[in-house]
Image (cartoon, rainbow, N blue to C red):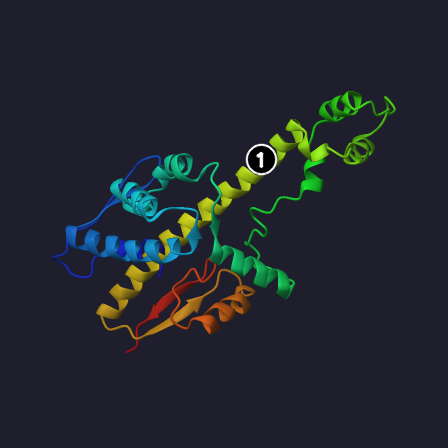
Amino acid sequence: MGFFDFLKPKKQEVEQPKVVVNSIPTITLSSKEAKAVAECYEVAYKKDMANVSGFTPEEVAAIYKELSEVDGGLMNMSSQPKIYEKYFKGRQWSWSEYDKWNKRFEELGRYPDRFVPNLGVVDKEGIVGLLKVADLKEILVANNVEFSSKAKKPELVALVKTLPNVFDLEIVKSAYENVLEKQKHELFTILLRTICFRGKSLDDNNRAIAVGVKKFELVYMDKSDKEFVDMALKDNPDAIDPFFPYDLTWQKPIIEF
Protein backbone atom coordinates (compact mmCIF):
# COMPACT_ATOMS: atom_id res chain seq x y z
CA MET A 1 0.00 0.00 0.00
CA GLY A 2 1.77 3.09 -1.20
CA PHE A 3 0.69 6.58 -0.27
CA PHE A 4 -0.79 7.20 -3.75
CA ASP A 5 -2.13 3.67 -4.45
CA PHE A 6 -5.63 5.05 -4.56
CA LEU A 7 -4.74 6.88 -7.80
CA LYS A 8 -4.88 3.51 -9.63
CA PRO A 9 -8.37 2.89 -11.12
CA LYS A 10 -9.95 -0.41 -10.24
CA LYS A 11 -11.87 -0.81 -13.53
CA GLN A 12 -11.34 0.26 -17.11
CA GLU A 13 -14.41 2.50 -17.16
CA VAL A 14 -13.35 4.47 -14.07
CA GLU A 15 -12.16 7.96 -14.90
CA GLN A 16 -8.38 8.26 -14.72
CA PRO A 17 -7.30 10.50 -11.80
CA LYS A 18 -5.03 13.34 -12.76
CA VAL A 19 -2.06 14.69 -10.88
CA VAL A 20 -1.84 18.45 -11.11
CA VAL A 21 1.78 19.60 -11.29
CA ASN A 22 2.33 22.47 -8.90
CA SER A 23 4.68 23.57 -6.15
CA ILE A 24 2.52 21.52 -3.79
CA PRO A 25 0.99 18.37 -5.33
CA THR A 26 -2.79 18.36 -5.66
CA ILE A 27 -4.94 15.51 -6.89
CA THR A 28 -8.06 15.43 -9.04
CA LEU A 29 -10.29 12.37 -8.58
CA SER A 30 -13.47 11.08 -10.18
CA SER A 31 -16.57 12.20 -8.28
CA LYS A 32 -17.10 8.69 -6.88
CA GLU A 33 -13.50 8.39 -5.70
CA ALA A 34 -13.50 11.91 -4.29
CA LYS A 35 -16.64 11.17 -2.26
CA ALA A 36 -15.14 7.95 -0.84
CA VAL A 37 -11.87 9.67 0.06
CA ALA A 38 -13.67 12.62 1.64
CA GLU A 39 -15.76 10.31 3.81
CA CYS A 40 -12.67 8.47 5.07
CA TYR A 41 -10.83 11.69 5.82
CA GLU A 42 -13.82 13.06 7.68
CA VAL A 43 -13.99 9.89 9.82
CA ALA A 44 -10.26 10.16 10.62
CA TYR A 45 -10.52 13.89 11.32
CA LYS A 46 -13.45 13.60 13.71
CA LYS A 47 -11.93 10.66 15.56
CA ASP A 48 -8.52 12.29 16.04
CA MET A 49 -9.83 15.77 16.82
CA ALA A 50 -11.91 14.21 19.61
CA ASN A 51 -8.54 13.78 21.34
CA VAL A 52 -7.60 17.44 20.90
CA SER A 53 -8.66 19.86 23.64
CA GLY A 54 -8.86 23.63 23.54
CA PHE A 55 -11.36 24.08 20.70
CA THR A 56 -15.12 24.49 20.58
CA PRO A 57 -17.19 22.08 18.44
CA GLU A 58 -17.86 25.00 16.10
CA GLU A 59 -14.14 25.63 15.67
CA VAL A 60 -13.45 21.94 15.02
CA ALA A 61 -16.11 21.97 12.30
CA ALA A 62 -14.77 25.22 10.82
CA ILE A 63 -11.21 23.85 10.68
CA TYR A 64 -12.40 20.76 8.80
CA LYS A 65 -14.41 22.90 6.39
CA GLU A 66 -11.39 25.03 5.53
CA LEU A 67 -9.09 22.02 5.19
CA SER A 68 -11.48 20.11 2.97
CA GLU A 69 -12.44 22.98 0.66
CA VAL A 70 -9.02 23.36 -0.99
CA ASP A 71 -8.17 21.28 -4.07
CA GLY A 72 -7.10 17.84 -2.90
CA GLY A 73 -8.74 18.28 0.51
CA LEU A 74 -6.72 17.25 3.53
CA MET A 75 -3.99 15.83 1.29
CA ASN A 76 -3.19 19.34 0.09
CA MET A 77 -0.87 20.76 2.73
CA SER A 78 -1.02 24.31 1.35
CA SER A 79 -3.84 25.32 3.72
CA GLN A 80 -1.99 24.28 6.87
CA PRO A 81 -0.07 27.54 7.51
CA LYS A 82 -3.32 29.51 7.34
CA ILE A 83 -5.08 27.04 9.64
CA TYR A 84 -2.24 27.20 12.16
CA GLU A 85 -2.18 31.00 12.23
CA LYS A 86 -5.96 31.31 12.48
CA TYR A 87 -6.79 28.58 14.99
CA PHE A 88 -3.71 27.14 16.73
CA LYS A 89 -1.03 29.80 17.14
CA GLY A 90 -0.88 31.31 20.60
CA ARG A 91 -3.68 29.08 21.88
CA GLN A 92 -3.60 26.69 24.82
CA TRP A 93 -4.37 23.31 23.27
CA SER A 94 -3.24 19.72 23.67
CA TRP A 95 -3.42 16.36 21.89
CA SER A 96 -4.05 13.59 24.41
CA GLU A 97 -2.99 10.79 22.05
CA TYR A 98 0.47 12.34 21.68
CA ASP A 99 0.68 12.90 25.44
CA LYS A 100 -0.31 9.28 26.10
CA TRP A 101 2.36 7.86 23.79
CA ASN A 102 5.00 10.30 24.98
CA LYS A 103 4.38 9.13 28.57
CA ARG A 104 4.39 5.44 27.60
CA PHE A 105 7.65 5.73 25.69
CA GLU A 106 9.21 7.69 28.54
CA GLU A 107 8.20 5.01 31.04
CA LEU A 108 9.47 2.33 28.67
CA GLY A 109 12.81 4.12 28.53
CA ARG A 110 13.02 4.27 24.72
CA TYR A 111 11.29 5.98 21.83
CA PRO A 112 10.66 5.17 18.16
CA ASP A 113 13.45 6.65 16.04
CA ARG A 114 11.31 9.38 14.48
CA PHE A 115 9.28 10.27 17.57
CA VAL A 116 9.98 13.75 18.95
CA PRO A 117 9.42 13.61 22.72
CA ASN A 118 8.10 16.19 25.18
CA LEU A 119 6.60 18.63 22.69
CA GLY A 120 4.97 21.45 24.61
CA VAL A 121 7.10 20.83 27.71
CA VAL A 122 9.83 23.46 27.70
CA ASP A 123 12.74 23.25 30.15
CA LYS A 124 12.88 26.70 31.73
CA GLU A 125 16.40 26.12 32.99
CA GLY A 126 17.53 25.47 29.44
CA ILE A 127 15.95 28.67 28.12
CA VAL A 128 18.59 30.87 29.75
CA GLY A 129 21.26 28.99 27.83
CA LEU A 130 19.59 29.97 24.55
CA LEU A 131 20.12 33.69 25.18
CA LYS A 132 22.93 35.53 23.41
CA VAL A 133 26.06 36.47 25.33
CA ALA A 134 25.24 40.15 24.92
CA ASP A 135 21.79 39.59 26.41
CA LEU A 136 23.22 37.65 29.35
CA LYS A 137 25.68 40.45 30.09
CA GLU A 138 22.93 43.06 29.83
CA ILE A 139 20.82 41.16 32.36
CA LEU A 140 23.75 40.91 34.79
CA VAL A 141 24.59 44.59 34.48
CA ALA A 142 20.96 45.58 35.02
CA ASN A 143 20.90 43.48 38.18
CA ASN A 144 24.27 44.77 39.47
CA VAL A 145 25.94 41.38 39.23
CA GLU A 146 29.69 41.54 38.73
CA PHE A 147 31.36 39.29 36.13
CA SER A 148 34.67 39.11 34.32
CA SER A 149 34.85 40.71 30.88
CA LYS A 150 36.47 37.46 29.72
CA ALA A 151 33.76 35.23 31.16
CA LYS A 152 32.57 32.47 28.85
CA LYS A 153 28.90 31.88 28.09
CA PRO A 154 28.47 28.95 30.54
CA GLU A 155 29.72 31.19 33.37
CA LEU A 156 27.32 33.97 32.38
CA VAL A 157 24.41 31.53 32.16
CA ALA A 158 25.20 30.20 35.64
CA LEU A 159 25.26 33.73 37.06
CA VAL A 160 21.97 34.72 35.40
CA LYS A 161 20.29 31.59 36.80
CA THR A 162 21.14 32.75 40.31
CA LEU A 163 18.87 35.77 39.91
CA PRO A 164 15.61 35.31 41.87
CA ASN A 165 13.50 36.95 39.15
CA VAL A 166 15.20 35.45 36.12
CA PHE A 167 12.08 33.78 34.67
CA ASP A 168 10.07 36.98 35.08
CA LEU A 169 12.41 38.92 32.79
CA GLU A 170 10.76 39.84 29.49
CA ILE A 171 13.68 38.61 27.40
CA VAL A 172 13.57 35.21 29.12
CA LYS A 173 9.78 34.95 28.87
CA SER A 174 9.97 35.87 25.18
CA ALA A 175 12.60 33.18 24.55
CA TYR A 176 10.45 30.65 26.41
CA GLU A 177 7.34 31.54 24.40
CA ASN A 178 9.24 31.31 21.10
CA VAL A 179 10.53 27.83 21.89
CA LEU A 180 7.10 26.71 23.07
CA GLU A 181 5.45 28.04 19.91
CA LYS A 182 7.92 26.17 17.69
CA GLN A 183 7.17 22.97 19.57
CA LYS A 184 3.42 23.50 19.29
CA HIS A 185 3.78 24.09 15.56
CA GLU A 186 5.61 20.76 15.28
CA LEU A 187 2.79 19.10 17.22
CA PHE A 188 0.21 20.70 14.91
CA THR A 189 2.08 19.46 11.85
CA ILE A 190 2.24 15.86 13.08
CA LEU A 191 -1.42 15.99 14.17
CA LEU A 192 -2.57 16.90 10.66
CA ARG A 193 -0.16 14.41 9.10
CA THR A 194 -1.59 11.66 11.32
CA ILE A 195 -5.15 12.57 10.37
CA CYS A 196 -4.22 12.70 6.68
CA PHE A 197 -2.44 9.34 6.68
CA ARG A 198 -5.19 7.63 8.68
CA GLY A 199 -7.81 8.90 6.27
CA LYS A 200 -5.71 7.60 3.39
CA SER A 201 -5.16 4.22 5.08
CA LEU A 202 -8.87 3.83 5.79
CA ASP A 203 -9.69 4.55 2.14
CA ASP A 204 -7.00 2.14 0.90
CA ASN A 205 -8.24 -0.61 3.21
CA ASN A 206 -11.84 -0.08 2.16
CA ARG A 207 -10.84 -0.36 -1.50
CA ALA A 208 -8.83 -3.50 -0.86
CA ILE A 209 -11.64 -5.17 1.09
CA ALA A 210 -14.13 -4.23 -1.65
CA VAL A 211 -12.16 -6.28 -4.19
CA GLY A 212 -11.87 -9.28 -1.92
CA VAL A 213 -8.68 -8.73 0.07
CA LYS A 214 -8.94 -10.43 3.44
CA LYS A 215 -5.37 -10.28 4.69
CA PHE A 216 -2.94 -7.43 5.29
CA GLU A 217 0.74 -7.49 6.15
CA LEU A 218 2.41 -4.84 8.27
CA VAL A 219 5.35 -3.11 6.61
CA TYR A 220 7.70 -1.32 9.00
CA MET A 221 9.86 1.64 8.10
CA ASP A 222 12.32 0.25 10.63
CA LYS A 223 12.31 -3.16 12.32
CA SER A 224 12.55 -1.49 15.73
CA ASP A 225 9.08 0.00 15.14
CA LYS A 226 7.47 -3.43 15.56
CA GLU A 227 7.72 -3.27 19.36
CA PHE A 228 5.75 -0.03 19.46
CA VAL A 229 3.22 -1.06 16.82
CA ASP A 230 2.57 -4.24 18.81
CA MET A 231 1.78 -2.06 21.81
CA ALA A 232 -0.75 -0.08 19.79
CA LEU A 233 -2.41 -3.16 18.34
CA LYS A 234 -2.64 -4.75 21.77
CA ASP A 235 -4.61 -1.68 22.87
CA ASN A 236 -6.76 -1.71 19.73
CA PRO A 237 -6.52 -4.64 17.28
CA ASP A 238 -8.62 -2.66 14.78
CA ALA A 239 -6.37 0.40 14.79
CA ILE A 240 -5.54 2.12 11.49
CA ASP A 241 -2.00 3.23 10.64
CA PRO A 242 -0.25 5.40 11.64
CA PHE A 243 -0.55 3.51 14.91
CA PHE A 244 0.93 6.35 16.97
CA PRO A 245 2.21 9.87 16.21
CA TYR A 246 5.22 9.83 13.85
CA ASP A 247 4.63 6.19 12.92
CA LEU A 248 5.30 5.30 9.26
CA THR A 249 4.14 1.68 9.37
CA TRP A 250 1.59 0.72 6.72
CA GLN A 251 -0.61 -2.24 5.90
CA LYS A 252 0.04 -4.01 2.61
CA PRO A 253 -2.90 -5.94 1.14
CA ILE A 254 -2.09 -9.59 0.38
CA ILE A 255 -3.65 -11.09 -2.73
CA GLU A 256 -4.24 -14.78 -2.15
CA PHE A 257 -4.53 -17.08 -5.18
Q: Is residue 162 above or below residue 215?
A: above
Front residue of 161/106: it is 161
Q: Is residue 119 left or right of residue 84?
A: right
Q: Is residue 151 left or right of residue 27?
A: right
Q: Position of residue 107 (x, y in %)?
A: 63, 64
Q: Is residue 161 above or below residue 18?
A: above
Q: Position of residue 230 (x, y in %)?
A: 50, 71
Q: Position of residue 223 (x, y in %)?
A: 54, 65
Q: Position of residue 136 (x, y in %)?
A: 75, 27
Front residue of 58/115: it is 58
Q: Is residue 212 above or below residue 171?
A: below
Check the picture and name the quadrant holding the C terminus.
Answer: bottom left
> Which image quadrant is residue 6 in?
bottom left
Q: Residue at x 34, y 47 (%)?
A: 60
Residue at the extreme bottom? 257
In the picture of the structure, the residue carrying the numbered disc 1 is: 177
Secondary element at image label 1: helix
Residue at the extreme left? 13
Q: Residue at x 62, y 36 (%)?
A: 176
Q: Indicate the amino acid at tag 1.
A: Glu
Check the picture and name the quadrant holding the N terminus.
Answer: bottom left
Q: Residue at x 48, y 56 (%)?
A: 96
> Which image quadrant is residue 157 in?
top right
Number of numbered callouts drawn: 1
Question: How many neighbours does mark 1 have within 10 angstroms: few (below 14), some (14-19), or many (20 or more)?
Answer: some
Can residue 8 be seen? Answer: no
